[in-house]
């Protein structure tokens, strides 16, 4: 994934974005979902219901950033058992109360006990 610059009307400047990896083609069928646009500069100016660049919510963009593996410094982490891989891993906390496993990428709503 190579960062690119595009204009963001909310920030009134160019921001860095990446596209997730292209899907793998096997037997004429895509084995993964289409690539997604990920904004690497999501922040305090992103206060609308939808991102003006990607038309997704801040929570969804936070999950995309975490799953992309880009900007790990942008997320706090907690140590817990992942629902997907069933191992104790670092879970990245994203906007909207979601956590994403740093090893397998499983995302779920954070449950506090």
Image: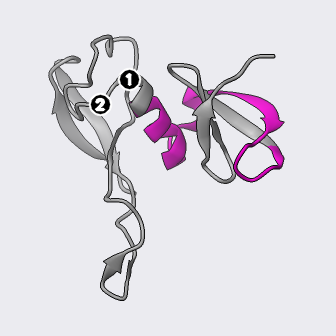
User: Who's the residue at 44% across and 25% down the image?
Assistant: 59
* Displayed quadrant of residue 10: top left
50 over 86 or under it: above or below: above
Which residue is at 36% across, 55% downward? 2
How much space separates mark 1 and mark 2, taking CA atoms? Answer: 7 Å
Q: Mark 2 — residue?
A: 56
Secondary structure at badge 2 equals loop
Whether residue 65 is in magenta: the answer is yes
> Residue 99 bears which disc, if any?
none
Chain part drawn in magenta: 61-88
Where is residue 74, by image quadrant? Answer: top right
The residue tagged 1 is: 58
**Image location (x, y in percent) of residue 17:** 31, 41
Q: Quadrant of the N terminus?
A: bottom left
At horizontal 32% and vertical 56% (from top left) the residue drawn is 35
Q: Depth check: 42 or 34 in front?
A: 34
């Amino acid at each position: 994934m190579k960062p690119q610059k595009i204009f963001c009307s909310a920030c009134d400047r160019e921001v860095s974005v990446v596209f997730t990896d292209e899907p793998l083609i096997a037997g004429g069928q895509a084995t993964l979902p289409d690539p997604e646009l990920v904004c690497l500069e999501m922040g305090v100016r992103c206060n609308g219901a939808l991102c003006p660049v990607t038309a997704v919510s801040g929570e969804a963009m936070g999950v995309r950033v975490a799953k992309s593996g880009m900007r790990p410094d942008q997320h706090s982490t907690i140590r817990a058992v992942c629902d997907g891989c069933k191992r104790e891993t670092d879970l990245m906390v994203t906007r909207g109360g979601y956590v994403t496993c740093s090893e397998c990428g499983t995302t779920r709503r954070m449950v506090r006990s």
